[in-house]
Image: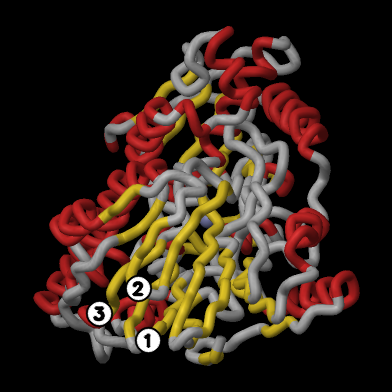
Amino acid sequence: MKLTFWGAAKTVTGSMHQLTVDGKCYLLDCGQYQGRRKEAEERNKNFPFPCREISAVMLSHAHIDHSGNLPLLVKNGFHGPIYASAGTADLCRPMLADSASIQEKDAAFLNKRYLRRKSLNVGAEAGDHMVEPLYTVENAEATYPLFRPVPLHAPTAIAPGIRYQSFEAGHMLGSTCMLLDLESQGRKTRLGFTGDLGRPGLPIIRDPEPLSAADYLIMESTYGDRVHEPIQSVREKLAHIVNRTYQRGGKIIVPAFAVGRTQQLVLMLHQLINAKEIPSFPIFVDSPLAVNVTEVFRKHPELFNREAQEFLTNHEDPFGFSRLTYIRDVEQSKALNDLHGPFMIISASGMCEAGRVLHHLKNNVGDHRNTVLITGYQAENTLGRKIEEQHAEVPIFGDPMPLRAEVQKLDALSGHADREEMLTWMKPIAGGLKKVFLVHGEPDQQVAFRAAIRERYGLEVIIPERGRSFEL
Ligand SMILES: [Zn+2]
């Protein structure tokens, strides 16, 4: 039994781990790597194994950095089952379709630029060439029939010698941690995988559940060296930010992943407006994906926590309330440029790497009345990170733009547990663990978290490099 780390190794993106049992290969997650363009393209395009030899995929949740390379795996010959929760399977449809259409549009844009330069015979850089999208909407569509939704806690035989069971991860709708019972040549072992681990008390979704006992644990470490503010203080801070920007007549731009944060933020704003803690002001959710994904949320109220369920029974639908306008159409999105504040635009992508939020940032970061509100983790080398660090100038569409808008962070709305929350989550199983592998974290966060786990539980902790294998 062998475990090999191919993605989210010393980084936060591209989650993908390979498990080999009795000569058969399985993947835990198949995420898209996000980062510098060329490196990301190379990494995503070239799988380090023959895709048709993968027998099955076990998917922790629908975020693109965990699921986004599935269509490419299928394009390259994978045709096995993909085990996931029903929420994840339903969310993957709009999310993979959106990812595919971004790939197609990106390739079309680059090809148009290449052909124009070629015809003018100017500026064609060495190595400039026609590009193909990483995958197409058609490839994404070929992926959906492979999903096998599995209820939480139901032990499921994947193949002889491998049994899968999932637990609530509390990170986003449908997110799971998993436990794999492995058996080879009479030897048994148990491997746990956190996927992305959420925080207790997040709006809408349920709290993370502990795993049953395991021998090995693959653990995320995004905030291995950070402690978030308590959730309760988020509401107050959000109210302050809204009121201050409102008084300046400014706009609030919120780069947010279309899934998770958007719905949580909308619910929180709704509660603040109802409590008259902030004025009733226009809120736009500008993302075709957020619209589709919100429909999946409506379909799965059974996955909500008690607060959200009560809110649903006692109030109007929190995802479609009257002050909120969902924007699907590009022309409507552009029309927001001519509208005067105060108002809020929530738009993807969350790390400001692509999508409509780029246009809104370009039009608004130069005005001191406005606020950019960061609600999630910003990876190294992303525009979101540069804004978070408040660089005097930030590059948007290749142009340096002065950053004069106020920048605020709501880390506590993050879908990721902080150091203390992760340590507490591990506690019930720490005594039985032989080894912990840290993934999904930048090196400084991982090194600090390794020290914290060693100190608290005296466990052996490994920070695997990409491509390293371990016998279990
Ligand atoms: Zn995630």
Q: Secondary structure at mark 3?
A: helix
Q: In the image, what residue occupies the spot 68% across and 23% down? A: 246
Q: Residues within 10 Å of mark 1 (few under 14, many from 20)?
A: some
Q: How far apart are the two marked residues, 2 and 3, measured between alpha carbons?
A: 21 Å
Q: Which residue position holds label 2?
A: 160
Q: Secondary structure at mark 1?
A: loop
* Rendering coords of residue 139 (x, y %): 17, 61
N-term-proximal mark, 3 vs 1: 1
- Residue type at mark 1 is Asp
Left of 3 or right of it: where is 92?
left
In the depicted structure, whether residue 115 falls above or below residue 332: below
CB within 8 Å, label 2 to label 1: yes
User: Which of the labelled discs sits on residue 51, or is there none?
Assistant: 3
- Residue type at mark 2 is Pro
Left of 414 or right of it: where is 232?
right
Q: How many marks?
A: 3
Q: Which of the 4 image quarters holds residue 146? A: bottom left
* Rendering coords of residue 49 (x, y %): 31, 87
Q: How far apart are the two marked residues, 3 and 1, measured between alpha carbons?
A: 18 Å
> Can see residue 363?
no
CB within 8 Å, label 2 to label 3: no
N-term-proximal mark, 2 vs 3: 3
